[in-house]
Image: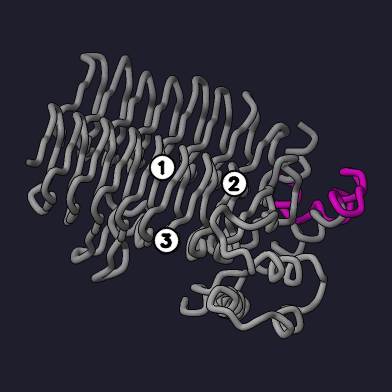
Amino acid sequence: MIRIGPYCVVGREVELGPDTVLVARVTITGRVRVGARCVFHPTACIGGPPQDRAPAAPDGRIEIGDDTSFDEATTVHLPKTGGGVTRIGSRCRFRYGAHAGHDATVGDGVELGRFVALGGHSVVEDGVTMDDRSAVHQFATVGRGSRVRSFVPVTEDVPPWMEVAGNHYRVVGLAPGAPPELEEARRRIWNSGLPLEEALAALPDTPAIRELASFLRRRAAGRFGRALEAARK
Amino acid sequence: MIGPYCHVDPGAEIGEGTVLEGSVTLLGRTRTGRDCRIHPYAVLRDATLGDRTVVREHVSITGARLGDDVYVMANSVVGPGCELENHVIVVNACVLPGRNRIEEWAIVSAHVELSEGLTVGRHAFVGGASRITRPVPPYVLVQGFDGEVRGINSVGLRRRGFRPETMDALREACRRLWRLGEPVDAVERELGMVPEVRTLVEFLRR
């Protein structure tokens, strides 16, 4: 059963899945589809227009998976691109004040800490943990399983399964649960001082290392350390 | 237009064409100009807004003046005595604690925290997650925990149609002031005929 508490605002084009709960004082407007068993806490606000001078794309929409929860003061914005989707996966948790900007893509099982801000068109892949007050630049990608520590402004793509820290972020280790063979790869890529291709050459050929290598090559082919910039005019 | 669950105190005034999206709270002597847009859960107390200014979700503004075409993004806090001039942008979750003057066209990026009473000069750009404890001069880009000047705000200046000669003069002034550590007087003597450099020099003397 869907539960909607007092003082909520739910727009005409909003679809809520079974057993989703709007605790109280929640606002969901615009074209939004929410899956099953999601929870929205008071003052969560989904479906505002992009934070941009241009208006929202008339046919843009927000899709939210199952079992995702939004704490207080969280925001998700509609896309700016025509026919675009701001997509939030399943089993995610948005903590107090977390924000997904227009056209952002968030995978499954992502944890966003307090006040985490995802810029427009940014991508956060499955299983990422972002600690409090970290942020992702427009068009940046945070790779699968990685962990971003508190206060880090992610201006360049974060490689899968890596843990990053610092004001100009550095790879400081492997994220919890990373495939152990990546430790050797991490040391060769970030500690050896070798150029990327030379560092990659001597590594064993496993799926995790192939994934890491192709991520880093895509990042190098982009601009400003962001693979998605390559597709931007 | 006033959406559902808004609260507007009797002393508040709303300009023509302004939209309160819903769940907005306007307290005390708050005044908005024309065609402003205020998003859900924003709370404005004794604030003055110019025309076409946008206040996004969960923003708190107390006792501050905002000019025309200002954009304050989600979760930011603007404290008492702040003045945001025309075309200023404040990105998500910034803290402007009080008596901060943000001059026209300046951009304060996400998660920036300013000390109380600091000024950000016109057309300056404050990079994301910076902690700012010194005034930010006009036309420059600052970034980081030390709020260090990294150069001029070239992207912003180009977008707003500044001439390449002006940008070159500002770039040279920046290089001398912050890379070579030359005194303000010397920079003024050689580049002071460019009005923007003069503005920069006058800011540094204040």
Is label 1 or label 3 in front?
Answer: 3
Q: Mark 2 points at which residue?
A: A149
Q: Provide the chain ID for the residue under circle 1.
A: A
Give the magenta range. Answer: B177-199
Q: Residue at x 21, y 35 (%)?
A: A26
Q: Which residue is drawn at 80% across and 34% down?
A: B205
Q: Name the residue under label 1.
A: A98
A58 on left or right of A168: left
Q: Does A100 appear above or below A201?
A: above
* Pick the front one: B181 or A228: A228
Q: Are marks 3 and 2 in contact (CB under 8 Å)?
A: no
Q: Are marks 1 and 3 in contact (CB under 8 Å)?
A: no
Give amino acid for label 1: Ala
Q: Position of residue A57 (x, y in %)?
A: 25, 64
- Name of the residue lying farthest toward the front: A180
Give amino acid for label 3: Asp
Helix, strand or loop status at disc 3: loop
Image quadrant of residue B121?
top right
Q: Where is residue A93 in the image (x, y as percent from the top left)?
A: 36, 44
Crowd around label 3: few <14 · some 14–19 · many ≥20 (10 Å): many
Alpha carbon distance from label 3 to label 2: 17 Å
Is label 2 or label 1 in front?
Answer: 2
Q: Position of residue A174 (x, y in %)?
A: 63, 57
- Quadrant in which the N terminus of chain B appears: top left
Give amino acid for label 2: Arg
Q: Which residue is drawn at 13% across and 43% down?
A: A19
Q: Which residue is drawn at 74% across and 57% down?
A: B170
